[in-house]
Image: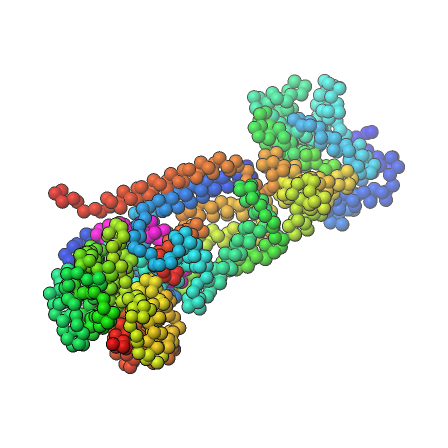
């Protein structure tokens, strides 16, 4: 079996299985823990829990002005690579076809050249994030292996995707295989590292939103 | 025609001018992506070439490759080329001759020891002693082994010979293998395609005749001159791919506008062949130009790459049921983990109950 | 109890006679038991982005990365991943993450108690909404069980258990009330068997700010309310809420609330104290399994109600003022507008600090930090931020609604020879009430 067939076939199957098993294991494992009930009377006019959760989920998309100055790089660079990744993943025709084969949904694509430019910017932004993590005294102290592994496994698909699109480094089908394999490793790692924030942020923000809005406090 | 006659002599005999011959040589040289300077060498080589003994073995095949090469639309010279080869043995064309054909084969092998070329089309069944394809009472595998013994080189024509082709497709009931599994260290050229482009076959033959050696081959043994670029990289519809304009079906607006066929299953990006440049039927058209995606027919196992109409990014495995099972397993593990955590919370380092020592 | 230093030079206090392993086990057990769903989700969610550091006055004041809020939770976090998380068995199997030992807990004592005032600014800065302040409060439970809390906080714990209050024996309470009434010329109600309002106190009212005892009495007398002080349940600041002694937190909460219910009160007025609000208004219900048949309000909320009702009229002061929002009242309690309404009713023009309301900087003394003298250097760093903000607002007066904030800011002012007086909202209302 050649590398590309392996990547598109068994590798992707196993990686997606690990992804689904792992994500559900972790999410159900945490969400099915008992919760403390808050019996204190809510502040008058407190919104229902679901609304409070939504307010936090969306409200925390931008930091409070007072934190923005010190957190400017983290916030802006964070958005650059998140939006960049989203565009590369969801607006590139081959990726849309991949998702369509899984979920049956599809939408219009952006021109490939635009995706390439966004991908290059995303790669640069990720490198900037790594440099920041390696040089900031705060981040150096609190970073763990998890942070570096998650960075690496997010960076590889971007860079191998760029290589495949520009045919640099090997034959195209080899580059494509490597790109798909990098996604396989990414998917397999996803449930076990901080990439899970993609799912967790809903509940983490939501829980604090519920707690704070119950008290009539700003989130 | 005597075997000692050179090609030049033969062409002179047929009334082909030296000028026409040189033009042909330049054409072949450029086809083979050889530098302009080698056109002369090619011409020289061809002119002095002696009639080449070729033994053509057809195994598990559909005869499409033979049909293709004999449909070569190139001018008369190509046919002359074909005439110049001493086709000492060809299964299909000689089928009516029966035993006499087999004798012809053995004689040709003896007379041209170490110098004859074996051309093979079709794959070789190996299961159950290779009984699934027998000719003249012996299995294909046996016939190949016999015939290869004193051959100079082997040319596997068509994807079946080069990679196993349709007989090898899942579930491969006959245990079909590509020729390369059985040639040992004999020089092998794979001219894949289902069928191959006629000019690819004749171009390679010209090269071998002229220079007495094999052209530059890729990692799959295919001549780089014809298999060095992907369809995608030479496709005239590529700008549509880049701009994100696709046909969604075979009769929609996109199809009518001639947009890229990636979404309806074109395997162009991972298929190496010359269809987008040389095209078929003397440069008339090729599948994409006719509105159908590339099947990837010059690549190994192209029948098992998920389907001709499923786009390239579609995973090969059956995802649905597997992922449903994975979801159930994951949720179960999650519940188990939280139950175990609750239990652990109660018992972890719990101080001994009073009364116990 | 003794003050010690770890091999790496970190100061810590230790109490009790437990061996090192027993301390470690006690802490780990308490850590593990503290995790319910929300705490677990939060422990899973940290991205190591460092935004929490930008919000913490102890990091901003010193520039020392170890004061990054999420870093303060390291032993707590590790207990979670090894014992409660969905992959806990894998963590234990593969030995991932260092196992918590007693040395680590000793090092972390100062991070959890000296360098954190439970102010919750980090919670607001976290993009994942992790309630770091709440988690630190929970982590303190384990530290208390391990006998690794600052000596002063442990001392206050013992006095609270012995006296019913960290600063004053319950026996003295009635006298203190009587004296305050006499000094300020205000009739006091002490230990009435039945009343509508029960007033509770914090240590500051019974020591430095005894005038406050008379101030609230004056207002309640003016509106003709039926009210009382009660020796059986007066202590509201709840040292257990701060030092990690969860059992004491429950005991003090129940004592205060049960007593008020026994008196037949419909309203319990909490003193000008931040932690009292958190402990009684928001956390008390966890021990009652259902709704508490009592309205629990902060002094500020009472003042707001009484001013809005029109039952008292206030002299107009006609000056400018800044307001320091006590963290547990504003940011974590939801009371931001009430004090401002009262200030406006006093005819004061509010010159807001650059960071005010829910985003105000902490005075630096909450969470027991002001009581823990070992933390003084850190507290002064936090004060400098407050001083700068006040000078930026350039107001004539400086008001707050928490006795401990007032003490902290006053101590800071003394240290830096700053001449600003920090005033109490209750005092302002009582002093400017037209009788």
Q: Position of residue B83 (x, y in %)?
A: 80, 32
Work out which quarter of the rendered image holds the C terminus of chain C and state it: bottom left
Q: Which residues are magenta?
A: C25-52
C387 lies left or right of B281: left
Q: Which one is nearer the viewer's eye here, B263 or A4?
A: B263
Colour scheme of the rendered structure:
rainbow
Going by the picture, which residue comes out furthest to the left?
A: C171
Does C43 appear in magenta?
Answer: yes
In this rendering, the answer to whether B152 lies above or below A119 is above
Q: Position of residue C26 (x, y in %)?
A: 21, 52
Q: Is residue C430 left or right of residue B113?
A: left
Q: Is residue B313 visible?
A: yes
Where is residue A122 shown, x and y percent of the image? 53, 57
Q: Measured along the vertical axis of the image, is residue C362 above or below residue B272? A: below
At x 30%, y 78%, the residue is C315
Residue ranking furthest to the right: B15
Where residue C170 appears, as percent x and y from the top left, is 13, 64
Q: Nearer the viewer, residue B180 or B301?
A: B301
- Look at 66% across and 46% down and name the residue there: B246
Q: Main secondary structure of the magenta part?
A: helix
State the residue at coordinates (45%, 43%): A19
Identified at 75% across, 46% down, the residue is B30
Q: Tell me if residue B158 is in the magenta stretch.
A: no
Please indicate, yes or no, whether residue B116 appears anywhere in the rendered image: no
| Location of residue B270 by image quarter | top right
Nearer to us in this view, B116 or B57: B57
Taking the image as shown, residue A157 lies to the left or right of residue B351, namely right
C413 vs A71: above or below: below
- Image quarter where the N terminus of chain C lies is bottom left
Of residue C321 and residue A27, the one placed in the foreground of this image is C321
């Amino acid at each position: 079996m050649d590398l590309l067939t392996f990547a598109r076939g068994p590798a992707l199957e196993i990686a997606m299985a690990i992804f689904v098993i792992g994500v559900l294991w972790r999410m159900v494992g945490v969400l099915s823990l008992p919760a403390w009930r808050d019996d204190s009377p809510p502040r008058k006019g407190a919104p229902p829990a679901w609304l409070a959760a939504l307010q936090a989920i969306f409200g925390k998309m931008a930091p409070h002005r007072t934190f923005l100055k010190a957190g400017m790089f983290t916030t802006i660079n964070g958005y650059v690579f998140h939006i960049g990744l989203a565009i590369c993943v969801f607006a590139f025709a081959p990726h849309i076809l991949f998702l369509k084969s899984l979920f049956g949904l599809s939408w219009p694509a952006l021109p490939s050249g635009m995706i390439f430019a966004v991908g290059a910017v995303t790669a640069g932004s990720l490198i900037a994030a790594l440099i920041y993590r390696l040089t900031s005294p705060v981040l150096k102290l609190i970073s763990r292996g998890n942070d570096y592994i998650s960075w690496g496994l997010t960076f590889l698909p971007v860079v191998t995707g760029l290589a495949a699109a520009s045919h640099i480094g090997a034959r195209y089908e080899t580059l494509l295989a490597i790109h798909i394999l990098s996604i396989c490793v990414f998917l397999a790692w996803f449930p076990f590292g901080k990439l899970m924030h993609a799912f967790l942020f809903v509940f983490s923000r939501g829980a604090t939103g519920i707690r704070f809005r119950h008290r009539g406090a700003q989130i | 025609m005597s075997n000692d006659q050179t090609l030049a002599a033969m062409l002179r005999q047929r009334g082909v001018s030296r000028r026409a011959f040189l033009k042909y040589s330049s054409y072949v040289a450029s086809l083979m992506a050889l530098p302009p300077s080698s056109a002369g060498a090619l011409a020289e080589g061809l002119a002095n070439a002696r009639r080449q003994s070729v033994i053509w073995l057809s195994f598990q095949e559909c005869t499409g490759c033979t049909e293709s090469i004999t449909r070569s639309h190139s001018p008369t010279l190509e046919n002359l080329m074909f005439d110049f080869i001493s086709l000492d043995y060809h299964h299909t064309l000689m089928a009516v001759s029966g035993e006499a054909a087999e004798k012809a084969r053995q004689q040709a092998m003896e007379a041209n020891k170490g110098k004859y070329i074996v051309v093979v089309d079709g794959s070789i069944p190996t299961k159950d002693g290779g009984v699934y394809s027998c000719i003249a009472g012996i299995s294909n595998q046996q016939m190949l082994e016999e015939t290869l013994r004193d051959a100079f080189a082997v040319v596997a024509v068509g994807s079946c010979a080069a990679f196993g082709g349709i007989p090898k497709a899942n579930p491969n009931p006959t245990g079909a293998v590509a020729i390369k599994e059985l040639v040992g260290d004999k020089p092998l050229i794979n001219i894949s395609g289902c069928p191959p482009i006629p000019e690819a076959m004749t171009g390679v033959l010209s090269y071998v005749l002229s220079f007495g050696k094999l052209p530059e081959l890729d990692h799959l043994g295919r001549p780089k001159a014809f298999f060095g670029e992907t369809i995608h990289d030479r496709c005239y519809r590529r700008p549509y791919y880049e701009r994100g304009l696709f046909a969604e079906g075979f009769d929609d607006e996109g199809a009518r506008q001639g947009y890229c066929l990636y979404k309806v299953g074109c395997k162009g990006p991972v298929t190496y062949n010359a269809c987008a440049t040389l095209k078929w039927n003397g440069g008339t058209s090729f599948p994409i130009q006719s509105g159908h995606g590339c099947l990837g027919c010059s690549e190994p196992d192209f029948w098992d790459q998920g389907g001709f109409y499923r786009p390239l990014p579609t995973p090969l495995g059956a995802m649905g049921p597997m992922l449903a099972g994975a979801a159930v397993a994951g949720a179960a593990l999650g519940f188990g983990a939280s139950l175990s955590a609750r239990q652990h919370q109660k018992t972890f380092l719990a101080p001994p109950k009073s009364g116990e020592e | 109890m003794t003050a010690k230093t770890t091999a790496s030079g970190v100061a810590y206090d230790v109490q009790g006679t437990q061996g090192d392993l027993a301390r470690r086990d006690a802490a780990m057990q308490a850590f593990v038991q503290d995790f319910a769903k929300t705490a677990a989700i939060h422990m899973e969610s940290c991205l190591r982005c460092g935004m929490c550091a930008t919000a913490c006055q102890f990091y901003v004041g010193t520039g020392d990365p170890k004061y990054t809020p999420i870093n303060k939770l390291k032993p707590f976090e590790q207990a979670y991943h090894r014992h409660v998380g969905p992959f806990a068995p894998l963590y234990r199997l593969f030995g991932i993450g260092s196992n918590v030992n007693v040395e680590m807990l000793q090092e972390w004592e100062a991070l959890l108690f000296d360098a954190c005032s439970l102010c919750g600014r980090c919670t607001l800065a976290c993009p994942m909404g992790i309630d770091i302040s709440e988690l630190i409060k929970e982590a303190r439970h384990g530290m208390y069980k391990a006998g690794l809390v600052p000596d002063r906080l442990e001392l206050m714990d013992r006095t609270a258990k012995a006296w019913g209050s960290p600063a004053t024996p319950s026996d003295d309470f009635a006298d203190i009330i009587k004296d305050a009434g006499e000094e300020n010329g205000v009739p006091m109600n002490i230990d009435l068997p039945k009343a509508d309002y029960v007033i509770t106190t914090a240590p500051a009212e019974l020591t430095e700010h005894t005038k406050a005892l008379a101030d609230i009495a004056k207002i309640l007398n003016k509106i003709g309310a039926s009210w009382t002080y009660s020796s059986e349940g007066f202590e509201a600041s709840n040292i257990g809420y701060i030092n990690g002694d969860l059992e004491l937190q429950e005991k003090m909460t129940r004592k205060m609330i049960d007593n008020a219910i026994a008196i037949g009160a419909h309203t319990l007025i909490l003193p000008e104290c931040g932690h009292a609000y958190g402990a009684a208004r928001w956390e008390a219900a966890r021990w009652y399994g259902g709704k508490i048949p009592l309205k629990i309000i902060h002094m500020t909320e009472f003042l707001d109600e009484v001013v809005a009702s029109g039952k008292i009229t206030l002299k107009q002061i006609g000056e400018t003022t800044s307001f320091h929002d006590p963290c547990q009242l504003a940011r974590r309690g939801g009371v931001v507008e009430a004090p401002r309404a009262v200030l406006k009713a006093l005819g004061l023009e509010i010159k807001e600090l650059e960071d005010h309301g829910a985003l105000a900087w902490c005075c630096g003394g909450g969470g027991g930090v002001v009581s823990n003298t070992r933390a003084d250097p850190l507290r002064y760093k936090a004060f400098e931020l407050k001083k700068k903000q006040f000078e930026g607002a350039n107001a004539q007066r400086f008001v707050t609604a928490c006795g401990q904030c007032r003490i902290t800011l006053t101590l800071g002012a003394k240290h830096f020879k700053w001449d600003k007086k920090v005033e109490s909202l209750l005092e302002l209302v009582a002093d400017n009430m037209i009788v």
